[in-house]
Image (cartoon, rainbow, N blue to C red):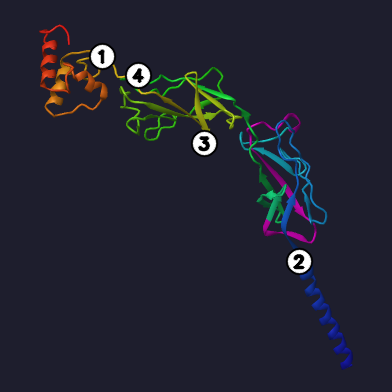
């Protein structure tokens, strides 16, 4: 009797052990550590592709998901317009746009995506953007921006330097130009334009600087291509109808540079303050120079201040200018 009871107890214990171990067996799954997909990459004029190739032997597949902008678990997003592509039959990839693909993936039974699963799409690194139902993932990749429509030539019109004038920061472009100067202001950069005084070796102040006689100048204009267009290494530039230098900056802008020859120094005796006329104001400026209170530095002003045409500027020039301003003498 005891032996029979003991055997029954052993059977019961064995059943309990088997039953307890069964859930553990069911929970034993294998992790998927990497995902590799092949899709049709965007190309100008092509329709979005929704085919996804997965190599044989992989333990995951594309989700059967068709809602809104999703077709068979695939969705395309236009990063340039911030919108999903919802009607692929009527849509073609556009130049200058950047696109992103999303693919929903489901693991086979007995498998699960690891928390650190890596993604490659067309042999390039991708990412995982989300997880659904504790098992599905959404793999994604951002593709390089498609080439834009090339801009062969840019033309910029600016007021050329003239003695006493202010630099021009409002360029003109041909009608329909697919480029523009951004309204960027930083330091001596105004409207994405910077003027440089080559003689003085410094940039000009947009609010205060004037062009001076005897000085040469250079202007740099930074242009931005309009949407869907781009500058290339073959883009040429014109400034005021003349060929100019240009180069592409790291941010894609086109830097157009033009140098202007030194402005002529024209003798206008007595016009010491360079306002185009000779009057008491010039007499005051000259008096301050002769008295060493405020010395003249502008080449044109120094030339005009030598009213006697002698060796340098002295009290005799001041006297002669004073007699002219007082209408004692008729000419300088």
Give how far apart the Cα atoms at labels 1 and 4 are.
Answer: 13 Å
User: Which span of residues is magenta-colored?
Assistant: 88-117
- Image depth: mark 2 or mark 4 in front: 4
Q: Residue 320 vs residue 221: left or right?
A: left
Q: Which one is in front, 80 or 306? A: 306
SS label for mark 3: loop
Above or below, 229 relative to 118: above
- Image depth: mark 2 or mark 3 in front: 3
Where is mark 3, residue-wise? 249
Give how far apart the Cα atoms at labels 3 and 4 are.
Answer: 30 Å
Q: Earlier in the sequence, mark 3 or mark 4?
A: 4
Q: Earlier in the sequence, mark 1 or mark 4?
A: 4
Q: Position of residue 215 (x, y in %)?
A: 33, 25
Give how far apart the Cα atoms at labels 2 and 3 are.
Answer: 57 Å
Q: Earlier in the sequence, mark 2 or mark 4?
A: 2
Give how far apart the Cα atoms at labels 2 and 1 are.
Answer: 95 Å
Give how far apart the Cα atoms at labels 2 and 4 are.
Answer: 85 Å
Q: How many marks?
A: 4
Q: Earlier in the sequence, mark 2 or mark 1?
A: 2
Q: Position of residue 274 (x, y in %)?
A: 25, 18
The crowding category of the residue bearing disc 3, from other C-alpha atoms within 10 Å (few below 14, some 14 to 19, many at least 20), is few
Q: Position of residue 269 (x, y in %)?
A: 21, 15
Q: Residue 59 vs residue 215: left or right?
A: right
Q: Which mark is residue 321?
A: none
66 in the magenta segment: no
Where is mark 4, residue-wise? 162
Where is mark 1, residue-wise? 276
Q: Quadrant of residue 65?
A: top right
Give how far apart the Cα atoms at labels 3 and 1 are.
Answer: 42 Å
């Amino acid at each position: 009797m005891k032996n029979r009871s003991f055997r029954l107890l052993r059977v019961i214990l064995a059943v309990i052990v088997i039953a307890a171990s069964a859930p553990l067996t069911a929970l034993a799954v294998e992790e998927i550590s990497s995902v590799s997909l092949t899709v049709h990459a965007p190309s100008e004029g092509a329709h979005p592709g929704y085919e996804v190739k997965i190599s044989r032997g992989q333990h995951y597949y594309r989700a059967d998901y068709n809602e809104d902008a999703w077709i068979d678990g695939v969705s395309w997003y236009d990063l340039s317009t911030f919108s999903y592509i919802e009607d692929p039959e009527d849509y073609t990839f556009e130049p200058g746009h950047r696109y992103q693909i999303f693919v929903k993936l489901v693991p086979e039974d007995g498998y699960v995506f690891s928390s650190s699963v890596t993604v490659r799409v067309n042999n390039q690194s991708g990412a995982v953007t989300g997880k659904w139902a504790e098992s599905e993932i959404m793999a994604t990749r951002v593709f390089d921006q498609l080439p834009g429509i090339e801009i062969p030539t840019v033309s910029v019109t600016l007021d050329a330097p003239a003695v006493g004038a202010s630099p021009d920061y409002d360029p003109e472009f041909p009608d329909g130009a697919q480029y523009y100067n951004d309204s960027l202001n930083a330091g001596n950069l105004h409207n994405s334009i910077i003027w440089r005084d080559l003689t003085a070796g410094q940039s000009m102040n947009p609010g205060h600087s004037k062009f001076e006689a005897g000085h040469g100048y250079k202007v740099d204009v930074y242009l931005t291509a309009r949407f869907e267009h781009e500058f290339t290494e073959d883009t040429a530039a014109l400034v005021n109808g003349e060929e100019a230098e240009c180069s592409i900056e790291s941010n894609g802008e086109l830097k157009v540079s033009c140098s202007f020859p030194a402005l002529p120094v024209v003798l206008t005796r007595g016009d010491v303050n360079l306002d185009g006329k000779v009057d008491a104001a010039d007499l005051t400026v000259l008096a301050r120079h002769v008295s060493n209170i405020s010395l003249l530095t502008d080449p044109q002003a120094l030339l005009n201040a030598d009213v006697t045409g002698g060796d340098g500027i002295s009290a005799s020039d001041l006297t002669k200018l004073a007699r002219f301003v007082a209408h004692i003498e008729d000419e300088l």
